[in-house]
Image (spheres, coloured by chain):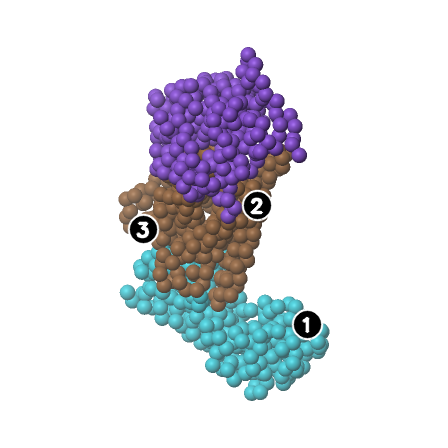
Chain colours: A brown, B purple, C cyan
Amino acid sequence: MKRLAPILLPLVGLLCLGSLVIGPADVGVADSLRALVAGGEGPLTLVMREIRLPRMILALAIGASLGLAGAAMQGYLRNPLAEPGLIGVSGAAALGAVISIQTGLAAGFALALPLAALAGAVMAVLLLLALAGPRGGALTLILAGIAISAMAGALTSLVLNLSPNPFAANEIVFWMMGSLADRSMSHVWLALPIMVVGWALLLPLARPLEALTLGEDAAASMGVNLTRVRWQVVLGTACVIGAGTAVAGAIGFVGLVVPHILRPLVGARPGPLLIASALGGAAMVLAADIAVRMILPGRDLKLGVLTALVGAPFFLHLVWRTGRQA
Amino acid sequence: MTLLSLRNLSVSLRGRPVLGGVSLDVGGGELVGLIGPNGAGKTSLMRAALGLIPAEGDSSLAAMPAAARARHAAWMPQSREIAWPVSVEALVTLGRMPHGQRGTVADRAAVDAAIARMGLEPFRHRTATRLSGGEQARALIARALAQDTPLLMADEPIAGLDPEHQIATLETFAALARDGHGVILSLHDLGLAARHCTRLILLAEGGVLADGPSREVLTDDLLARAFRIRAFHADTPDGPVFQPTRVIR
Amino acid sequence: MEAGADALPDVPRRVVSMNLCTDQLAMLLAAPGQLLSVSHLAADPRGSAMANEAAGYRINHGLAEEIWLMRPDLVIAGSFSARATVDMLRRLGVPVVVMDAAHGLAEIPARLREMGAALGREDAAEAAVADFDARLIALRDEVTNRPRAALYYANGYTSGDRTLAGEIIATAGFANIAAEAGLPSGGHLPLEVLAMADPQAIISGRPYPGASRSEEILDHPVIRALRDDAVGAVLTDRDWVCGTPFVLRAIEDMRDTRRRMEAE
């Protein structure tokens, strides 16, 4: 991690800057930044503070959350294929969010939205642990994930189709593929506090996950409280995935690709991998969100499309490689 | 000095009673071999003593708070799991975790000593998961050594190793015992147990059948009862030789 | 106008309309007792300017079986009506006339005449056209400084000059920013571009019940801020949806809005 920090931190900083200055409104870098910081009259301040800034903050926070949650789940399950999107946690969070919106709960009480998404995520993780658990192999995990994803996706589609609103039926694309377009600061305030709670639960897992390298028995004998670790993983993942999905939809593959790429660079140690994956995830989502605005700027290209274009072939490569080793 | 004290320890697995009323003490300087047929409860006894599974009765180890216990006893489970392709050095360093793992001079010294003792210096920066079975086993023992605890417990630490490494490993444990540590191992190889352990505890029929030096425990009578075997034994200038020969029908 | 293989009756006596816009034109021009049924959309006050009148007709849901059971001698459909339904009705021997929607003010007289021809009510149609033309001329003001307006709907969609909504606001004296944003026919307008254009009026559709992410953008702080500076929330309604003479009411509303803005 000491080697990686001087690369990852400036990279994330640069991408944050890029996210702030790239957009359909053709404005120069200096003008944009001046409007952001100093304010002033004119629509540019509005654009910078109410459109670009929340988008950048969300990309940063959600990307970090996805990377962190992916590394935490992989460390806990001792399985490099565990990824919140792949194993159905994001899909279940989307279902919770959609239910709270369509039943009107979210309109009544703002926090109902991320909390409902969180509840969906918790149920998915618990279901997953019950089906696969740390002793289940990779195959069981993926199968359980497919089942949970499929169920969540089908129910989300059903709820949307039952809506009286004619636009709702087509929203399934947003929920399944994710997008940060036109998010506002209200979305930031909705999601960020719960994500911070999730980070506070997941980051201290560094030491327990290191001990788990030796298996559960040895870790327990070294003083790790396995029950507490399990709850930290479940709730921490649910918080960050729930909050992020509630405002941006399900963004997949980040939690798979980033820890996988960074693992060799931290000597495969699950502890340092947590924060490295947080930074890597932030970089990946920021970059994808910038790319979405540069490729096909007129259309609302979904963020998840880009992460899937990178992540799905990556996953196939992993499958192929695992098959060859077996 | 007593390092482990068990009083009336009873263990049930899935509702079935496995062990009943085990009481024993283990002190520094002992290399204890836990022997017995499959299913006798060797693993269960050790895990119950460590407080990893629920049990009735008292274990001085299980009664300790988790952090203190981790500094008092190191446990090497049978599974020999290494989940990630970490370096040997990183693996051994995991043993320092109960001591805070702040990377202090004492930590590095303990890791270096453990690596040297297990002959792993040439492998220090190699990926642990790419080593041979015997080398991996040694790396895991080094981790336990780095933990620097008065008591060390291991579940079948030499299973599947070649004769050289079997003997070398047991000699390492014997040296640890001579240094004042307490070592408890579960073993299947009665011959090696006889040659290296200072004390044998025979588990069978749901309890401790015998407890003492090998010549008292490996009697024809007890062998017949516990293992249903007959064995050949002799004292040679090179130490005792013990070899099971026949099954008793 | 497209006609089915069967010969169209000169003066049909049992007409069924299955499209919101054709419903309203038919209700305007049909002789008493000529029109049997209109679609359920005509009875919905959200989209129909003639919801009250529609209550006096049988309601259909645009399904071939239900319409055929009404034994019509003419069915009028829109170009967006389900192709399968139109084909099925023709196969069952029902004459179907498919009428295009009006894409601009200039097409409204043509549609009125088409409907008049289909119903055998050419005189009523000519009268309606004359009335429409006269009222339209009366509504056109001489405007020197056209205030800038943006049409902004769910999903960030905007309508350009060459659409019905675009012509409504243009006739009322506004300048549509969609043109300066490079979208003469409309399309997705990024929120940033809308903000930078800083229009003096933002015109949106009324939100539907239930919630949708598509409509969420209309609640974005940027839109709210622009509305605060501008003339407030201007919402389109049923008069804007179809190319009927009711668009004149919409033009009148917008013209009055513009006059209010100029007075401030």
Q: Dot 1 corresponds to which residue?
A: C88
Q: Dot 3 corresponds to which residue?
A: A42
Name which quarter of the figure residue C11 lies in.
Answer: bottom right
At x 55% / y 58%, what residue is drawn? A154
| Pointer 1 local density, CA inside 10 Å: few below 14, some 14–19, many at least 20 | some
Residue C240 at least partly seen: yes
| Pointer 3 local density, CA inside 10 Å: few below 14, some 14–19, many at least 20 | few
Residues indicated by labels 2 and 1 sit on the same polypeptide chain: no
| Pointer 2 local density, CA inside 10 Å: few below 14, some 14–19, many at least 20 | some
Eyeballing the image, is C30 above or below C138? below
Extreme-front residue of the structure: B221
3D distance between C-alphas at marks 2 and 3: 57 Å
What amino acid is at disc 1?
Answer: Met
What amino acid is at disc 3?
Answer: Gly
* Tag 2 subunit: A
Disc marking residue A140: 2
Whether residue A81 sits left or right of residue C193 in the image: it is: right
Extreme-bottom residue of the structure: C32
3D distance between C-alphas at marks 2 and 1: 50 Å
At x 52% / y 55%, what residue is drawn? A152
3D distance between C-alphas at marks 1 and 3: 57 Å
Q: Secondary structure at mark 3?
A: loop
Residue A57 rendering spot, x and y as whole percentages: 37, 45
- Locate the C terminus of chain B and report the quarter of the image it occupies: top right
* Tag 3 subunit: A
Q: Secondary structure at mark 1?
A: helix
